[in-house]
Image: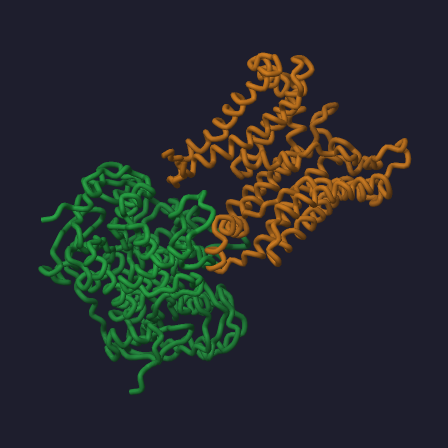
Chain colours: A orange, B green
């Protein structure tokens, strides 16, 4: 078997890749559903209904999509410049830590000052966290896949230490959790009495801003040039290392916003289960979107829908909700395969 | 007449819309050297790769010694007695000559190589055919010419009866080329048949019995070497009479770029610069000849700004340069045409528009307050496409889809549009068709006429001789003394390329 390059397909065909990948994913996972003794059709129907069948379900899906949009954008930005940031999970938690440190009464400010301030501080912390691996990569050639991945574990242990120590809520009955953020530091709900909060609106703005950066600005152009061909970019006078630094700052900052939005908009406090792997799911989201910032919104809602829908489905159909993890992972693999097939023709001989 | 040892019938190979080989048929007889002549991109290498089983032809068949050869199977080609010496060698550098030659010839389950017998056989072959080599030497320590001998021995060791040499002289000095030709004579005397791929007319005339000319994938002519002439072959090869470029005498201006005693580290897989001094003057083309790997890559990288000098000085327009980078080189008015237009000159997956602004996107013309002005960029791309006669579907097309000649025209347009004072042209015509080559030459001569200083680095001696007002030869990281147009003969230049010191006058 060998691969031969082929010209890029037209845009219309390109848009079919995620659709084809999702169809293949359903096909593959239906085998597992059958193995679990249920009917794939009824299970997928229940997943879809659980994700979008009622107003409650749809709002829940959007709520779940919010952190995925942030981490998906973080990954899309970094991957576009071929900076392999696998550490969005760590950057998310750091964003959460900063939100707690500044948002539990340390700063007596009104909402319209406090919330932007916390956002900026959280972004700065996430940005700095990714700057380390970026410096190691450009200075010493250390593989950022390894450093960012390992930082996830380091940061999670660091947060665990904080929650057992300085940030531990004295009224928390001994649970490893932080104090709740003050009212001024909370993102309001979009609809009174529902869980969907303004973090979702902020994530949509972030997607639009990232789209503009990638499409219209010098920085986005430099990032794409470095990602596509760093040698040619460097020959043309683009400061490759500096562009990678800026990419790291932007990516880390976006991932940290996920932590901010979860703490400030939804959970109210910091615990060790703030994220069920949103940082990692962000990679799936970004790949399904083919690194397009606006596509990230759609694919984040899709991935969130599978998680939310699978929860609902497992309550009624008796198929474990782990099927959601399998579906999301399979979707990543089929999407990567679809992208490969779009660039290369497979020849058997 | 003796029967053909090899017969190709109606070989056709397409790569997407490109027809690389179009219904090619020919015979090869025992004891014959057939030259396959053609421009770069005419389809010579594709044809040989089909013959050797690297590619599968879309149509047509190959017969060796009267038996048909299964397509797409290099092992079958080897067994049928076909040996191929590739343009880029396929040797394991950290192993000995003997190990490289015997590699893959013995069954895997044989625990131990019979070194004694193998070495005896290699010595016999190398003695018979004038391929002097020590079987115990490590390949990494060998010169390029010696490595080629190892490749030929490898084929002979496997009892090759048909030997394919793909551009064998591209990496050789004139003296090594002569030695290679003597070896070929000895091989055919033993009854081997040889296909010799080249685009150099004088070599074809010197070494072959019969010439096949390929143009744009088609076999356009077949001549007995004794009955043809260089000019006839040239006309067949390019499909038109080529007029030698007429060059007006140079109006030499002030020194625009001066290197004084510059040294660098090794670059691009070649030698480092070792105390090089060079002055480029306005209105003059300086040609740099040399066998590749002798420091041309380092010199080009230095002038382009991608390599820092370790010692010595760079002065531009009389002012010494303190810090050095691609951006500073561009700002100083140096235009760069890189050697590798795919990997370095362009970003294949970005559009024509995005590629033409690559060196200037920060200028006020193309960006404001960090935002790019795509309309201006597109306008610039359209300008270059029109002015430099680039054939491309639209400015939005990915540059990867353009042919080599059109890609080079875009690079040329990007580099020459700001009217640079210094032009570094590194292998500017490699792999281009004749039309594109003469276009590049015309543009370089125009720049010379308006007073730019041009450094032309090329492995094509004919190109150097045709364009240069002054010729330098690079060998082992050092430069020869310059010679004016017509001052040194080709043979004298060849001696310098081979690294022989200049004879006292």
Position of residue B277 measured from the top left corner of the image (x, y, whole percent): 42, 78
x%, y% of residue A278? 66, 34
Residue A295 image-quadrant placement = top right
Q: Residue furthest bottom?
A: B505
In the image, residue B384 lies at what x, y percent? 34, 55
Q: Position of residue B61 (x, y in %)?
A: 22, 38
Q: How many marks?
A: 0
For the question of whether residue B385 can be seen, the reply is no
Residue at the spot 49% in from the left edge and 71% down from the top edge = B264
What quarter of the picture does the C terminus of chain B occupy?
bottom left
**Camera sees residue B21:** yes
In screen coordinates, is A31 left or right of B28?
right
Q: Quadrant of residue B486?
A: bottom left
Q: Is residue A205 above or below residue A143?
A: above
Q: Nearer the viewer, residue B398 or A323?
A: A323
Pick the front one: B489 or A295: B489
Q: Taking B223 as reference, is B253 left or right?
A: right
Residue displayed at 55% across by 36% down:
A287
Q: Is residue A333 above or below residue B183?
A: above
Rendered position, B103 above or below B172: above
Task: Determine the image quadrant of residue B235.
Answer: bottom left
Q: Is residue A305 left or right of residue B212?
A: right
Q: Residue at x 27, y 62 (%)?
A: B128
Residue at horizontal 47 percent and vertical 47 percent from the top: B111
């Amino acid at each position: 078997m060998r691969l031969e390059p082929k010209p890029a397909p037209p845009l219309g065909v390109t848009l079919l890749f995620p659709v084809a990948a999702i169809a293949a994913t359903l096909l593959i996972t239906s085998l597992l559903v059958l193995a679990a003794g249920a009917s794939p059709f009824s299970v997928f129907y229940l997943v879809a209904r659980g994700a979008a069948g009622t107003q409650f379900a749809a709002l829940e899906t959007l709520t779940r999509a919010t952190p995925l949009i942030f981490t998906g954008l973080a990954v899309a930005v970094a991957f576009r410049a071929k900076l392999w940031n696998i550490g969005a999970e760590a950057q998310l938690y750091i964003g959460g830590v900063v939100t707690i440190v500044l948002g539990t009464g340390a700063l007596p400010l009104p909402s319209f000052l406090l919330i932007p301030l916390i956002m900026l501080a959280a972004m700065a912390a996430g940005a700095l966290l990714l700057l380390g691996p970026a410096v190691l990569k450009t200075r010493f050639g250390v593989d950022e896949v390894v450093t960012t991945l390992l930082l996830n574990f380091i940061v999670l242990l660091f947060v665990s230490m904080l929650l057992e120590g300085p940030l531990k809520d004295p009224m928390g009955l001994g649970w490893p959790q932080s104090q709740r953020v003050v009212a001024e530091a909370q993102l309001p709900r979009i609809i009174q009495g529902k869980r969907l909060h303004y973090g979702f609106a902020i994530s949509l703005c972030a997607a639009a801003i990232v789209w503009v950066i990638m499409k219209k600005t010098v920085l986005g152009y430099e990032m794409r040039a470095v990602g596509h061909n760093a040698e040619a970019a460097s020959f043309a006078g683009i400061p490759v290392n500096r562009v990678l630094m800026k990419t790291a700052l932007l990516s880390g900052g976006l991932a940290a916003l996920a932590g901010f939005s979860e703490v400030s908009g939804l959970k109210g406090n910091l615990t060790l289960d703030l994220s069920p792997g949103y940082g990692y799911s962000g990679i799936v989201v970004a790949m399904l979107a083919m690194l397009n910032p606006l596509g990230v919104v759609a694919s984040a809602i899709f991935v969130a829908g599978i998680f939310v829908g699978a929860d609902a489905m497992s309550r009624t159909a008796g198929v474990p909700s782990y099927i959601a993890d399998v579906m999301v992972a399979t979707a990543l693999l089929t999407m990567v395969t679809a992208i490969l097939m779009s660039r290369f023709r497979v020849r058997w001989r | 007449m003796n029967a053909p040892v090899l017969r190709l019938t109606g070989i056709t190979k397409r790569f997407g819309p490109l027809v690389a080989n179009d219904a090619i048929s020919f015979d090869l007889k025992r004891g014959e050297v057939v030259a396959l002549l053609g421009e770069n991109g005419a389809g010579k290498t594709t044809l040989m790769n089909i013959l050797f089983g690297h590619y599968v032809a879309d149509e047509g068949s190959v017969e060796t010694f009267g038996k048909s050869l299964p397509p797409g199977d290099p092992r079958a080609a080897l067994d049928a007695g076909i040996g191929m010496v590739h343009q880029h060698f396929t040797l394991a550098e950290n192993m000995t000559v003997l190990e490289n030659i015997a590699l893959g010839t013995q069954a895997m389950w044989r625990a131990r190589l019979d070194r004694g017998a193998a070495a005896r056989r290699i010595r016999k072959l190398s003695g018979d055919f004038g391929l002097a080599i020590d079987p115990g030497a490590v390949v990494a320590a060998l010169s390029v010419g010696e490595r080629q001998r190892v490749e030929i021995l490898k084929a002979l060791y496997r009892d090759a009866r048909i030997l394919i040499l793909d551009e064998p002289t591209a990496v050789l000095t004139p003296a090594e080329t002569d030695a290679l030709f003597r070896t070929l004579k000895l091989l055919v005397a033993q009854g081997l048949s040889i296909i010799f791929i080249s685009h150099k007319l004088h070599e074809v005339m010197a070494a072959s019995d019969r010439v096949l000319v390929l143009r744009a994938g088609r076999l356009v002519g077949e001549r007995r070497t004794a009955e043809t002439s260089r000019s006839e072959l040239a006309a067949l090869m390019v499909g038109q009479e080529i007029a030698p470029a007429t060059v007006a005498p140079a109006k030499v201006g002030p020194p625009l770029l001066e290197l004084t005693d510059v040294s660098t580290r090794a670059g691009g897989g070649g030698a480092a610069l070792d105390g090089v001094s060079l002055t480029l003057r306005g209105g003059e083309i300086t040609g740099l000849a040399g066998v590749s790997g002798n420091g041309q890559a380092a010199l080009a990288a230095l002038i382009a700004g991608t390599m820092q000098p370790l010692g010595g000085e760079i002065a531009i327009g009389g002012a010494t340069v303190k810090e050095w980078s691609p951006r500073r080189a561009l700002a100083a008015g140096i235009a760069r045409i890189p050697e590798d237009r795919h990997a370095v000159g362009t970003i294949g997956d970005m559009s024509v528009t995005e590629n033409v602004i690559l060196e200037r996107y920060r200028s006020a013309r193309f960006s404001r307050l960090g935002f790019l002005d795509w309309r201006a960029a597109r306008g610039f791309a359209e300008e270059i496409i029109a002015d430099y006669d680039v054939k491309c579907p639209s400015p939005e097309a990915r540059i990867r889809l353009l042919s080599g000649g059109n890609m080079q025209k875009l690079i040329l347009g990007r580099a020459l549009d700001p009217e640079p004072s210094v032009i570094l042209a590194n292998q500017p015509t490699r792999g281009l068709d004749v039309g594109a080559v003469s276009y590049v030459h015309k543009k370089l001569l125009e720049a010379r006429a308006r007073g730019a200083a041009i450094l032309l680095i090329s492995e094509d001696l004919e190109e150097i001789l045709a364009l240069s007002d002054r010729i330098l030869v690079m060998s082992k990281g050092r430069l020869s003394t310059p010679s004016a147009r017509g001052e040194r003969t080709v043979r004298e230049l060849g001696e310098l390329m081979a690294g022989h010191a200049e004879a006292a006058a």
